[in-house]
Structures are given as structure tokens and as C-alpha cells.
Amino acid sequence: MLALAEDTSQPLLERAKFLAIFASNLDEFFMVRVAGLKRRDETGLTVRSADGMTPREQLARIAERSQALAERHALAFQDSVRPALSEHGICILHWDDLTEAQRAKLSGYFSDQVFPVLTPLAVDPAHPFPYISGLSLNLAVTVRDPQAHTERFARVKVPNNVPRLVPVEPADPAAPNIDVTFLPIEDLIAAHLGELFTAWRSPSTTPSGSPATPTWTSRRTATRTCYRPWSGNWRGAGSAAGAARGHRLDERARAGAAAARAGRGPHDVMVVPGMLDLTMLWRVYGWTTRS
């Protein structure tokens, strides 16, 4: 599927569909195959497979190989399919790419449809790490108490009862070659984290003033960037494996720290140079084929 998605001779929407299928297949692989291996490893079973490897050795090889595949998958979308979609009038933008008028309209949508179903959860040493449901997308946020000067880790689950890709009205309806524009829901939530953490502030901001952009995903949890603190995208599957996305040098360290908070090891984190959970491309495929 990944090779077909990378094949530029394939029709563009078919390539987007192949990316979505690959993302779904990889999730299922972790939920079934990797979850089984982790159970064997945790229970101390050292029965070797037909290739002579123990469950732990297989998990190490899988982590190495899946990291490479996840990077190929993300870059196929980021560097090839996404620009090609834009050239054909199908744009997936980020908050910083929008005009003030578009932001104002989406802020109203956030207040009416998204904000009421958000439940941020702070984490402290006295309580266990919050449960991350399978295949969910989450924002990992670090906020600072301005009075106590302490930092706190928080998690905001992206609700699954709102569209992952939010349609955006074109900045110029008369502009040619723009058929449909989407904003990922995690970008919309990240841009409004200040409304969720009104008594806190973030320890750092990016130069553009936009949310930090490490994105994480785990085969049982997915996370992405958040409010002026760093944030990440996680996504879940049946095993404790994860992935992180971003463009900063400390991204893997942050991903590892969050994995440790959740009781996971370094091999349970994948760093992905792009958006998480590309099964969202089914929406693009369905929208455009219906149109």
C-alpha cells in the first residue's frame, strides 16, 4: 500500500486512499501482532519464533522497521500527496495559514461545537497517568502556574464526535482552483488552549506565536501539538507503542518523557515528521469523490 501511495503514476485520490489504508493497517498490526508480543515479553515467555528471535528481540526489530515505515508514510503525504492535492484545489491548512476572517469564523465553530465536549486532564505525581483510549488523538500540553512557578503536564483528548478535518470557507470565494479547504481539528483546539487553561500559561512560545508542533501518536494513544507550551499528538492502538511528530531537536526527548509518564519504554515511541493518523484522508477521498 505504501509503495502504491508513493507511485506518482497512480491517480492522486487513489494515492491518498492508499495512505489512509496503510495507516489503518499499521494500527491494526500494533493492536494485534505487537500487542501479543508485548504480552509474551511482559509475562516472561521466551519461546523463540521460527526465525529464532525472542519476543523482546522481535519488538526491537519491529520498532526499528516501523519507525522507518512511519517516516516514509508521513513524508509521502507531506512532500508529495499534500502538495499535489493543493495544486488540484484540495488544501489542508494549519491555523497560521488562515486569514483573520477565517479564524474568526472557526473560533465561533470552536466555541459552539468543540469547546463543550473537551475535557482537559492535568497530571501530577499523586495520581496515575490518565487512561488513553485506543486509537484516540490527544494533545499533550505543558502549562506553568504563574504564581507557584511550577510546570504541569496535561492531556486534552480530541473528541471523536466532531470531524477530524473541519471545512474552511475560502478567503476569496472568487479565487480559481480552490475547491475545498480543511483545517485539522487538533490545530483548531491547539489555537484555543488558552480558553481551556485560563489560570495557567505556557512556559514557552514559538516565534510565530503558534502552538508548538510536536505530534505524537501511539498505537493506543495519539498526541499532537498544543498551547504555548510544547504539546504533542498521541494516538492509540492495542499495544503501548507511540509516535511523535514535530520539527524541534528535543522532540524525541519530550516524546520519551511522555512515554515514561504513561509507563512505556523508549521503543514504544515513534517520531513522525508529519501529521498523525492519516486515516483522515478517507474524508478527503469521500468528500472529493462525492463532489
Image (spheres, rainbow, N blue to C red):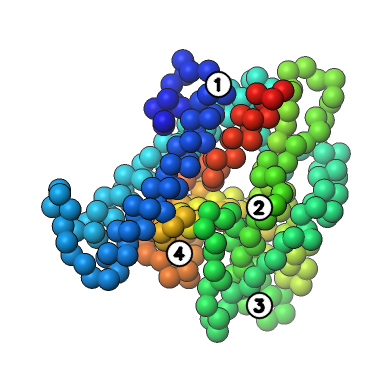
- Quadrant, the C terminus: top right
On the image, numbered disc 2 is attached to which residue? 160
**Horizontal side, residue 118 vs residue 154: left or right:** right
Q: Check the image and report above or below for 32 versus 89.
A: below
On the image, numbered disc 1 is attached to which residue? 12
Give the spatial CA distance, label 3 vs label 4.
24 Å
Q: Position of residue 99 (x, y in %)?
A: 80, 37
Kind of residue sitting beneath label 4: Ala
Q: Check the image and report above or below for 245 versus 149.
A: above
SS class, disc 3: loop
The earlier-in-sequence mark between 4 and 2 is: 2
Kind of residue sitting beneath label 3: His
Q: Nearer the viewer, residue 218 or 291?
A: 291
Give the spatial CA distance, label 4 vs label 1.
36 Å
Look at 45% across and 37% down and name the residue there: 22
Q: Residues within 10 Å of mark 3 (few under 14, many from 20)?
A: few
